[in-house]
DNA sequence: GATAGTAATGAGAATCTTGTTCATCGAGCG
DNA sequence: CGCTCGATGAACAAGATTCTCATTACTATC
């Protein structure tokens, strides 16, 4: 759809890049591993290599189109950059990811960094817990 | 020295485990990769395998003796669990690590999790910035 | 202090994730 | 339409961590 994003980033409009953008746009979970994107491509009949998926995602990240997160363990997840910064809560049981933004925390971070003589550029904040969702396999006792 | 920690954790007191504990206790930086520990072992003449270092560190983590952090990129770092929880600031240029604890942030996190129906178990917070240390290779312009 | 039983170790192979190489392909431009 | 250079795919490579399995060494017991 939005090939203008690609052009603005100085990237040629190619089929792999469009498809990957599409998948990121239409995904329910919003936070996808490179492999998950790769599988979706295969499922929709596209013959795109995993190396290309990683390459394109890294380029998208450099262009500010997506951001890369390390929510847990080994595999990075990617999400479309839709304007606002936010942080994440992850359920230890079902892996569900919620997003939040807290101005108080953001400001405290600036303050803390300044107190330590740092000028802050970025931060990573992930909360891990047990969600109380219906579909969560092991809900905490009410 | 403190073999009691090992016994309490239900771990046999072996030479690799004692040496690794020692290195963690005596290290200046306090945050060490498995490889850094491995190199120190080699330097002090111990014939301990890298696999053992990883294995022991994972056991120490499970026993609550150390905690594993993903401060940047690829390699995890380990630090001795010395009582209090804290979070970290990392310098993008020189890699220096500072520690901090902020009660306001801790409380906000609990609040946010509760608002989303999560009971929080853990969290990871890392600030990335530029430090103003003398030894930092590229200090930000004053 | 010697002994048996079991857990721990070392060496190397294996795995998993991500990146690189290089020959081929295709997007963008005239 | 044809050129040029960036993009792709396949295979390979690299880095971090874990696993396998034969050997070793704690620890409890005698
Ligand atoms: Mn998100
Ligand atoms: Mn620390
Ligand atoms: Zn859940
Ligand atoms: Zn620095």
Image (spheres, coloured by chain):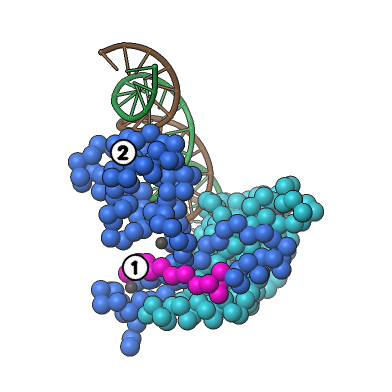
Chain colours: A blue, B cyan, C green, D brown
Q: Splitting the image into 4 quarters, where does residue C27 fall? A: top left
Callout 2 crowding tier (Cα within 10 Å): few <14, some 14–19, many ≥20: some
Q: Is residue B47 visible?
A: yes
Q: Position of residue A91 (x, y in %)?
A: 38, 71
- Quarter of the rendered structure image containing ligand 4: bottom right
**Part of the protein shown in magenta:** A94-106
The one of B11 and A122 positioned closer to us in this rendering = A122
Which secondary structure lies at badge 1? loop
Helix, strand or loop status at disc 2: helix
Up the image or down, D7 lies above or below A115; here it is above
Classify A80 as above or below B103.
above
Nearest the viewer among A115 and A41 is: A115
Chain of the residue on which disc 2 is drawn:
A
- Residue A98: give x, y in percent of width and height: 38, 69
Q: Which residue is mark 2?
A: A16
Count of residue discs: 2
Query: Which mark is drawn over residue A96?
Result: 1
């Amino acid at each position: 759809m939005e090939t203008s994003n690609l052009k603005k980033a100085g990237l040629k409009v190619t089929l792999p890049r469009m498809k990957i953008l599409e998948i990121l746009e239409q995904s329910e979970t919003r936070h996808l591993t490179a492999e998950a994107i790769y599988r979706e491509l295969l499922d929709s009949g596209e013959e795109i290599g995993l190396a290309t998926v990683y390459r394109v995602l890294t380029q998208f990240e450099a262009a500010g189109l997506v951001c890369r997160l390390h929510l847990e363990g080994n595999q990075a997840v990617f999400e479309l950059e839709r304007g606002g910064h936010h942080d994440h809560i992850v359920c230890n049981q079902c892996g569900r990811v919620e997003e939040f933004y807290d101005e108080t925390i953001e400001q405290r971070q600036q303050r803390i960094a300044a107190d330590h003589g740092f000028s802050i550029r970025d931060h990573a904040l992930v909360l891990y817990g047990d969600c109380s969702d219906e579909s969560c396999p092991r809900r905490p006792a009410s």
